[in-house]
Image (cartoon, grey):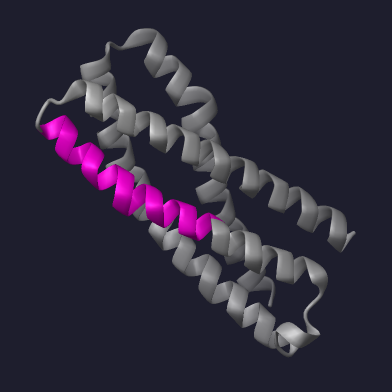
Amino acid sequence: MAYAKLLHLLSVLIWVGGMFFAYMILRPAAVEVLEPPPRLRLWVNVFSRFFPWVWGSVAVIVLTGFYMISLFGGMGSSPLYVHLMLGLGTLMLLIYSYVFFACYRPLRALVAEQRWPDAGAMLGKIRQLVGLNLALGVALIVMVFAMRG
């Protein structure tokens, strides 16, 4: 179980840490330094590198999570924090999937077509959803830490 926990935690760090960096550090710096067209190109490039890491992290989180649940004897025997992790983690995955399929893919096309106002609006939508997912991720980490003692 120790290796599963380690892989689980590392994957969470990649996903939530990446969102923190993008939201709190990269975004403000990019807004300060770059005009919209290069800034939008930057974000498409950043997402194209970050999102495969998120998909890999999500896969590891799900696999290790269900493995650890099985070690508890299933959900019926799992502590409350496991139920919260599964519920909020599923919500985070749904939000991320929406960002990837309904926002990022259109953003790529809009940037390729140089439709800057539309691309900017789509990036704004992504920013809001990443902010929500970041808040959920941090809240989940705090809850699990507090509940595990």
Percent x, y of residue 3: 63, 72
Percent x, y of residue 21: 51, 32
- Write down the quadrant of residue 122 in the picture: top left
99 horizontally vs 75: left or right: left
Overall secondary structure of the magenta section: helix
Residue at x-position 39% and y-position 59%: 55
- Write down the quadrant of residue 34 in the picture: top left
Residue at x-position 36% and y-position 9%: 33
63 up-or-down from 113: above or below:
below
Quadrant in the picture for the N terminus: bottom right
Percent x, y of residue 103: 32, 44
| Residue 142, magenta (yes or no) | no
Give, as a single range, the part of the protein colored magenta.
92-112
Depth check, front residue: 77 or 120: 120
- Write down the quadrant of residue 7 in the picture: bottom right
93 horizontally vs 33: left or right: right
Percent x, y of residue 99: 38, 47
145 up-or-down from 111: above or below:
below
